[in-house]
Image: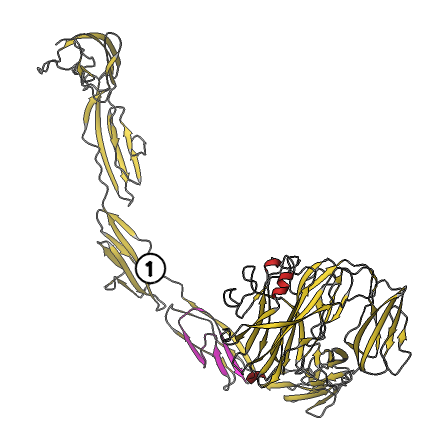
């Protein structure tokens, strides 16, 4: 879709359709006798009232052009050309206008897009607002690509366009647009479906195909962005949709884009001979070696296009030719095989070499800068520093390369820049801290070929001086670079300073005085003080420094404390009562004060709490100390009263829980012991606070204190009358000794078991009164005499 501006806001719109004569649907072709042109406002994307309009077509015109002259068998390919034209009036409007023709569907045999039989086409263009960019006519492609391509055969096609306005053109491959569907193949914004509004929809590529790689090929399809030269060697037969764009720029501003949506038919061909070669649009310099891409040729004829010469020809396969002067030349290659020949022509432009000339290699002095500038005008400049300006400023070492481009040709020149980094380095700075005369050497580092001049007019690199002061030296290298440096020689009188080591009282400030020989000396101390004295109460090592001019001397001295004389001792603790005399640790203190109020060398202590002491030593130092006095109660201890018991009894004596230590008169150290024998038992305990308690108990053991025999009745009457209601109700009185009783029925079934003489059977079995009759008992016990006994017998239950 293109347009031409006719004047008076009139534009001639033109649509060119190329129909597949073989695979195209005849009914669909006939239905396109009229095309619907839609125009949309650019600012709101709404359709202009009165549109779409029906436009009649012209044609068809059969496209017979092929890309191959000597082909053995013509492929089955056919293309018909139809065109539609209409003149419209469009007033200038913000946002311009979009013109569109929308139609579905494409050939179902297309290889490189998804759902080709259901994918439509949208051929559109944009008319800009002339108030923004001026009136415009769209660019128009000059030629139509061949109606078929052959696999494995190179294509070199001039796909350039003409622009009536002289705008700059840029070419690229792009993705075509789609519109319509099988239900509404010719949308008319009415009963036949709605037309798409801008922005329009793109087709979907299949598998690995893209806008920049739409056809299987090696090399792949490519278009030169500046010349429009389209190149490809297809490797697979099929039908392929390709989008080719040309964009218009006016004064660097984008104006419009024309897109050709074209179907390339690729077939396997048998070619006798094909002529093809490569040469760039611009040949840089007069001599060029041509690359021949022809196929099947037996011989060649080259004509390099120099009209005024007859010797500008060659029969070589890859000839080299030197052109006499700059200009445009039509290069022709004819490839022959038997009686068939194929011709390929290409226009080249020979560009005269224009070599930039940079200055000769240069040496810079430190701090100097060098401006490097191209001495010729070019379309583009590129330095190896990355700069794209026509000049750069350099101040560092390196090789600087300038590339100047004219008509895509680039020529280079190089300059080497070296920075003379030799600078004068003076030595001999010194300081004399005495009044003695001196003969001192000063000088500068040796630089080959350099000249030196000192401020005392000496031109020697080194010299001896006897006077203090500044000495300046200047140096000129053999490259003429100048630098300066200086030496300083100073002399001041000798200065001395000292401070005596001192011992003092802790926390009592002491003032130190410096002794120095020069009244003009500046005295500083390591703790930050200044002046002839320094006061401090903190022990340590200090430094005093005396400075006269640039000369200084220091002395280190110690400030230490008198040894501490007061040590009251550890904390004290007492049990039950406090009454003791506390004495001063030493007798030679000048004064002693207890608890901040009571003087004296000793103190009567009667209460718990904190005891403080403050003394003045023989050195006049004040020292203080304190201790804590604690009072604790002795632990309670009671082993019980003296007692008499059976020989078989073994009481446990307990001295109480939680003591630090226990000591019994039998040597035991445990809290509890067992009294196996008669006698006096004594224990001493010490609590965790260190307080002690002591107690004793007398234990008398007799074997005749109670009878040692057990009486077992021969009957009992559990009738609740209070007499003989339980069994055995014996009078065994030995406490703490062994006792076991078992009761059985006459069949040997155990009825009860007791381990204490207070245990008796009430005549019930599981809560049910037992039957009258004879029962059996067995009893074992230890008597008061500590002898083991046992009985076995029977008894009768009566009710």
Q: Is residue 193 above or below residue 570?
A: below
* Residue 272 appears anywhere in the view: yes
> What residue is shown with label 1?
586
Q: Would residue 283 appear left or right of 604 to someone viewing this image?
A: right
Q: Position of residue 39 (x, y in %)?
A: 54, 74
Residue extent of the magenta highlight: 522-548
Left/right of residue 151 with respect to residue 617 in the rendered view: right
Q: Quadrant of residue 287?
A: bottom right
Does the magenta run of residues contain 434?
A: no
**Residue 250: percent from left, percent from top:** 63, 82
Residue 114 in view of the camera: no
Q: Is residue 378 above or below residue 150?
A: below
Check disc 1: other Cα within 10 Å, few if <14, some if 14-19, many if 20+: few
What secondary structure is marked by label 1? loop
Classify residue 84 by image quadrant: bottom right
Name the residue: 78% across, 83% down.
Answer: 354
Pick out the residue farthest to the left: 721
Q: Is residue 57 above or below residue 150?
A: below
- The residue lying toward the viewer, choosing from 681 and 371, is 371
Please provide percent x and percent y for residue 492: 58, 86
Main SS of residues in magenta: strand
Magenta segment: does it hold 541? yes
Quadrant placement of the C terminus: top left
Residue 357 position in % (x across, y down): 77, 84
């Amino acid at each position: 879709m293109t347009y031409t501006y006719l004047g008076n806001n009139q534009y001639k719109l033109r649509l060119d359709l190329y129909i597949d004569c073989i695979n195209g649907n005849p009914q669909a072709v006939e239905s396109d006798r009229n095309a619907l042109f839609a125009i949309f406002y650019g600012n709101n994307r709404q359709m202009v009232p009165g549109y779409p309009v029906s436009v009649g077509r012209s044609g068809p015109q059969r496209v017979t052009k092929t890309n191959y002259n000597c082909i053995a068998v013509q492929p089955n390919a056919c293309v018909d050309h139809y065109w539609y034209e209409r003149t419209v009036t469009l007033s200038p409007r913000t946002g311009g206008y979009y013109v569109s023709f929308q139609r579905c569907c494409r050939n179902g045999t297309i290889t490189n897009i998804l759902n080709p039989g259901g994918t439509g086409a949208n051929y559109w263009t944009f008319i800009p607002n002339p108030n923004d960019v001026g009136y415009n006519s769209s660019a128009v492609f000059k030629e139509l690509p061949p109606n078929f391509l052959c696999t494995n055969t190179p294509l070199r096609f001039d796909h350039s366009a003409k622009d009536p306005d002289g705008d700059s053109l840029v070419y690229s491959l792009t993705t075509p647009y789609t519109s319509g569907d099988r239900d509404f193949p010719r949308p008319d914004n009415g009963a036949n479906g709605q037309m798409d509004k801008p922005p329009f929809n793109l087709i979907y590529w299949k598998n690995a195909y893209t806008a920049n790689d739409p056809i299987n090929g090696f090399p792949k399809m490519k278009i030169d962005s500046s010349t429009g030269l389209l190149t490809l060697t297809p490797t697979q037969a099929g039908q392929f949709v390709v989008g080719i764009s040309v964009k218009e720029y006016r004064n660097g501003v984008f104006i419009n884009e024309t897109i050709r949506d074209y179907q390339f038919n690729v077939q396997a061909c048998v070619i006798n001979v094909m002529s093809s070669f490569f040469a760039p649009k611009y040949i840089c310099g007069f001599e060029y070696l041509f690359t021949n891409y022809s196929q099947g040729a037996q011989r060649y004829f080259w004509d390099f296009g120099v009209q005024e010469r007859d010797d500008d020809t060659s029969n070589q396969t890859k000839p080299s030719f030197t052109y006499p002067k700059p200009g445009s030349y039509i290069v022709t290659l004819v490839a022959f095989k038997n009686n068939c020949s194929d011709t390929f022509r290409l226009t080249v432009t020979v560009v005269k070499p224009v070599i930039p000339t940079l200055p000769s290699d240069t040496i810079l002095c430190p701090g100097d800068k060098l401006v490097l500038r191209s001495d010729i005008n070019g379309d583009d400049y590129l330095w190896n520093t990355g700069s794209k300006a026509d000049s750069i400023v350099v101040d560092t070492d390196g090789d600087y390369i300038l590339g100047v481009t004219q008509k895509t040709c680039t020529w280079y020149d190089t300059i080497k820049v070296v920075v003379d980094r030799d600078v004068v380095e003076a030595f001999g700075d010194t300081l004399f801290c005495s009044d003695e005369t001196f003969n001192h050497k000063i000088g500068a580092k040796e630089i080959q070929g350099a000249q030196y001049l000192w401020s005392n007019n000496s031109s020697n690199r080194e010299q001896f001086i006897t006077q203090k002061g500044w000495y300046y030296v200047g140096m000129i290298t053999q490259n003429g670079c100048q630098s300066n440096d200086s030496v300083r020689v100073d002399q001041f009188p000798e200065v001395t300073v000292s401070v005596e080591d001192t011992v003092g009282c802790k926390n009592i400030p002491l003032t130190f005085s410096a002794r120095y020989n020069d009244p003009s000396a500046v005295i500083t101390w390591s703790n930050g003080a200044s002046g002839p004295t320094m006061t401090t109460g903190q022990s340590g090592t200090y430094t005093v420094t005396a400075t006269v001019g640039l000369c200084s001397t220091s002395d280190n001295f110690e400030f230490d404390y008198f040894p501490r004389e007061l040590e009251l001792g550890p904390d004290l603790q007492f049990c039950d009562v406090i009454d003791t005399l506390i004495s001063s640790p030493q007798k030679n203190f000048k004064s002693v004060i207890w608890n901040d109020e009571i003087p004296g060398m000793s103190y009567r202590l009667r209460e718990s709490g904190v005891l403080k002491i403050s003394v003045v030593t023989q050195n006049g130092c004040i020292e203080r100390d304190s201790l804590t006095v604690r009072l604790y109660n002795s632990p309670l201890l009671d082993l019980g009263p003296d007692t008499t018991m059976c020989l078989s009894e073994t009481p446990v004596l307990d001295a109480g829980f939680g003591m630090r230590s226990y000591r019994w008169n039998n040597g035991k150290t445990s809290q509890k012991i067992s009294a196996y024998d008669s006698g006096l038992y004594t224990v001493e305990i010490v609590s965790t606070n260190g307080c002690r308690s002591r107690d004793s108990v007398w234990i008398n053991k007799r074997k005749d204190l109670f009878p040692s025999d057990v009486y077992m009745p021969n009957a009992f009457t559990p009738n609740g009358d209070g007499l003989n209601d339980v069994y055995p109700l014996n009078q065994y009185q030995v406490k703490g000794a062994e006792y076991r009783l078992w009761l059985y029925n006459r069949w040997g079934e155990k009825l009860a078991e007791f381990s204490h003489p207070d245990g008796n059977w009430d005549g019930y079995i599981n809560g049910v009164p037992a039957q009258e009759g004879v029962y059996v008992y067995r009893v074992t016990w230890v008597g008061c005499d500590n002898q083991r006994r046992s009985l076995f017998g029977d008894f009768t239950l009566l009710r």
